[in-house]
């Protein structure tokens, strides 16, 4: 009878587990947004003729039509493969592209055209650009950025201007070369941007007046706004901040106990540094990387809980506590005057309590009770076992 009940219970439990698994399986996450797509076209304004890996080559610029925006600058990260203009490209990841050194390409895009300040970039590169129009300047900065990108993605080297090679005029060539040199010499690794915005961890704790965190931000490549309610955001040195970048860290502080919430905001979810791969096969045509940012505004939030800091004792309480040991000192005086063979007065007290026998009797009583109870339970169990066995034998006979 017991066996039947056990099997029935097992079947019921299995059915419950299976039902729970089906229920969990139906709780699938919401479908992700459709991948962003774009169509590359040739950039108007003409190209340039440069010396790349000691070979004279004429190159043109590219732009991407993406999310109803035309003419978004885009760069090639696949020098030896032809581009598929007017064909659909799909947004991908750095790993999917299998292009090397994209961390340094990201820095190049952040400081090159069009994201870097043009005047500061030219000054940093040592370029005197007094006679350039804005259109001419932007064109030269684009090709300087493109050749620097190729330096990292494909190992391409931009050579110096040479007479008799039918290259772009020397003045324009020198601008491209100096900016290329600056970008390739100073580039450092930067993280891959993402289309979503996230803050980790989602929560932290600290005492009031201290820093909670750090909180790390991952998202698009452009500046990310930081807004705090109930406290303030600071950097590692405790300086207040109101913005950060992809991969940046900050801490939250508050002077009073309570909760502080932080909201980070990025305006363009599809930022420069996102790669685009040919929809008909990523290795069939040139791989591209976005040079500017577009898309929707994305946000993320986190919080910190601050507990009250411990209250320091007042002067009156500390003075009264310092006066209280006086009576105990007079009470312990006779004990110190008692002769003892031990060099320490505390040692005989410990030995006396263990030799006294009172504590041992207190410890022994529960032990005997436990042993006796265990023997009794053993005897009862043996009797029940024999009784059940006898009934089973009689039933079989």
Image (cartoon, rainbow, N blue to C red):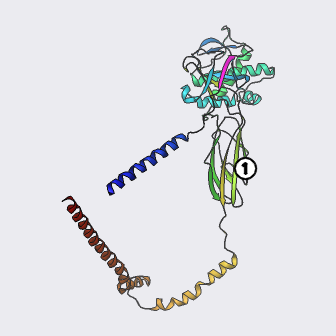
Q: Nearer the viewer, residue 328 or 276?
A: 276
Question: Which type of secondary structure does the marked residue at label 1 adopt?
Answer: strand
Residue at the (80%, 22%) spot, across then down: 134
Q: Quadrant of residue 167?
A: top right
Q: In x, y percent, where is residue 101? A: 57, 28
Q: Residues within 10 Å of mark 1 (few under 14, many from 20)?
A: some
Q: Quadrant of residue 360?
A: bottom left
Q: Nearer the viewer, residue 340 or 47?
A: 47
Q: Which residue is mark 1?
A: 228
Q: Is residue 253 magenta?
A: no
The quadrant in which the N terminus is found is: bottom left
Bounds of the magenta segment: 32-41
Q: Is residue 39 magenta?
A: yes
Q: Residue furthest left?
A: 397
The quadrant in which the C terminus is found is: bottom left
Vertical placement of residue 94 versus 327, above or below = above
Q: In x, y percent, where is residue 81? A: 57, 16
Residue 19 left/right relative to 293: left
Vertical placement of residue 363 versus 287, above or below = below
Q: In x, y percent, where is residue 49? A: 67, 12
Residue at the (38%, 51%) spot, across then down: 8
Q: In x, y percent, where is residue 358? A: 37, 86
Q: Nearer the viewer, residue 265 or 378?
A: 378
Residue 180 left/right relative to 386: right
Residue at the (74%, 19%) spot, across then down: 139
All told, the count of numbered labels is: 1
Vertical placement of residue 215 versus 355, above or below = above
């Amino acid at each position: 009878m017991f066996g039947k009940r056990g099997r029935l219970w097992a079947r019921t439990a299995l059915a419950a587990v299976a039902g729970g698994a089906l229920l969990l399986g139906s709780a699938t996450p919401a479908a992700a947004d459709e991948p962003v797509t774009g169509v590359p076209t040739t950039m108007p304004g003409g190209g340039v003729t440069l010396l790349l890996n000691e070979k004279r080559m004429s190159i043109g610029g590219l732009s991407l039509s993406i999310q109803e925006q035309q003419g978004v600058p885009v760069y090639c990260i696949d020098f030896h493969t032809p581009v598929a203009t007017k064909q659909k490209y799909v947004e991908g990841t750095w790993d999917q592209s299998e292009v090397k050194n994209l961390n340094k390409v990201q820095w190049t895009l952040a400081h090159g055209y069009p994201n870097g300040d043009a005047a500061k970039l030219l000054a940093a590169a040592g370029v005197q650009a007094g006679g350039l129009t804005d259109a001419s300047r932007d064109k030269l900065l684009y090709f300087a950025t493109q050749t620097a990108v190729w330096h990292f993605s494909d190992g391409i080297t931009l050579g110096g201007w040479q007479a008799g090679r039918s290259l772009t005029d020397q003045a324009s060539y020198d601008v491209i070369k100096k900016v290329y040199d600056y970008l390739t010499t100073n580039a450092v690794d930067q993280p891959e941007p993402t289309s979503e915005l996230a803050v980790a961890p989602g929560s932290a704790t600290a005492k009031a007046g201290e820093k909670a965190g750090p909180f790390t931000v991952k998202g698009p490549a452009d500046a990310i706004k930081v807004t705090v309610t109930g406290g303030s955001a600071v950097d590692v040195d405790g300086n207040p901040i109101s913005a950060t970048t992809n991969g940046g860290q900050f801490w939250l502080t508050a002077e009073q106990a309570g909760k502080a919430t932080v909201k980070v905001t990025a305006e363009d979810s599809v930022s420069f540094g996102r790669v685009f791969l040919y929809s008909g096969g990523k290795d069939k045509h040139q791989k591209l990387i976005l040079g500017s940012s577009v898309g929707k505004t994305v946000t993320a939030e986190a919080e910190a809980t601050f507990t009250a800091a411990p209250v320091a004792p007042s002067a009156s309480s500390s003075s009264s506590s310092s006066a209280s040991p006086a009576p105990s000192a007079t009470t312990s005086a006779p004990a110190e005057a008692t002769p003892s063979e031990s060099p320490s007065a505390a040692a005989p007290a410990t030995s006396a309590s263990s030799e006294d026998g009172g504590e041992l009797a207190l410890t022994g009583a529960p032990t005997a009770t436990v042993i006796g109870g265990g023997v009794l339970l053993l005897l009862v169990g043996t009797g029940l076992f024999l009784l059940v066995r006898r009934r089973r034998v009689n039933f079989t006979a």
